[in-house]
Amino acid sequence: MTSLTDPRHRADTLSFFTAALQNFEDEHLLFSVLCSVSDPDPTPPTPPPPHSETKPVERLIILDSSFNPPTAAHAQMVLSAVEDYYDPTATETTAVGPGHARTDTQGGPIPAGAKGSARILLLLSVQNADKAPKPASFPQRLCMMYLFAKDLQRTLPPGLRVDVALGSHPYFHSKSEVIAREKEYDAREQIFLAGYDTLIRIFNPKYYTSETMQNVLGPFFERARLRVTLRGGADWGGEGEQWGYMAELGAGGIERVGGRKEWLDRIDVVENKGAVVSSTLARAAVERGDARELGEQLGEGVKGWILGEGLYNDKEP
């Protein structure tokens, strides 16, 4: 069980992430790994090992979310990506320097479908942290990310490391660039996990006013893949409608909005095979006191933290 039931244990965890967030803001950092999780044991967080003790990997699997709270849907996105990209027998790669993509032995990016070594990065992007974001503060979200990482470790292959990090950029392409410059991460390829709603925003021309979409997204797709999970429920239409959007992009739609057709080769689309799960539904289950629904929406560690801290019980939006 990864639930932190001891109030003192919870207080230490919250204090750790509160101090980490304050340091992030005080130092005006763009990106920072706060802790690493390599086992499911319910121990307090500690700073990550020095860069000299880490090894580069072929793929960095990045889950960038508001984590308000992290849910079973987030977990499924990570586990599905690990199943498709991670080979537990693979050896680490040789670093070539920050910001430079590696190539395989024949040259070029990693072939689609190839598996290799990997690490997982849980990334929370914070802006205007002094405005007390609701319904859960950033330190509380970081605590839930930590417990989410512990929950993941109960299912992940042994030795697959999960990092909890903060970033200050709002868009995927800028986050990717900052991460690529970090000595901490020297992966051959970044894998950004996203939902269908995020894909819609990425190819919306209204977000590209000062620079063209090709100038912004071109470097992103050179170093990264986008793994898109179709959305369940009725809010975004059925899967047929979502697949239809992908077909439209492939039939010239991506060029019409300012993109390049070859980018589609860097997008992997996967179906949502589970029940409808979302952070909104999880928060609603807490407000109703619906323990059964909450158990379906959240992992044990995250659920225990929310109940122990009394999160999401008020009716504020």
Image: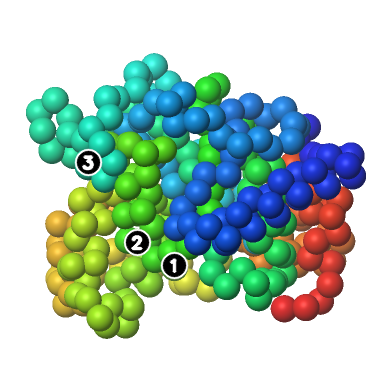
Mark 3: which secondary structure?
A: loop
Categorize mark 1 by other alpha carbons within 10 Å: few (<14), some (14-19), many (20+).
Answer: few
The image position of residue 150, as x and y in percent, is: 66, 36
**In the rendered view, would you say 41 is above or below 251?**
above
**Image colouring:** rainbow
Circle 2: residue type: Ser
Mark 2: which secondary structure?
A: helix
Q: Give the side of residue 106 with respect to residue 277, left or right.
A: left
**In the rendered view, would you say 257 is above or below 116?**
below
The image position of residue 245, as x and y in percent, is: 31, 69
Circle 3: residue type: Ala
Tell me what residue is drawn at x 21 percent, y 57 percent. Answer: 219
Categorize mark 3 by other alpha carbons within 10 Å: few (<14), some (14-19), many (20+).
Answer: many
Residue 196 appears anywhere in the view: yes
> Mark 3 or mark 2: which comes first in sequence?
3
- The quarter of the image holding the C terminus is bottom right
Q: Kindly identify which residue carries mark 1.
A: 170
CB atoms at circles 1 and 2 under 8 Å apart? yes
Tell me what residue is drawn at x 45 percent, y 58 percent. Answer: 30
Circle 1: residue type: Pro
Mark drawn on residue 239: none
Q: Kindly identify which residue carries mark 3.
A: 101
**Looking at the image, which is closer to me, 83 or 68?**
68
**In the rendered view, would you say 78 is above or below 237?**
above
- The quarter of the image holding the N terminus is top right
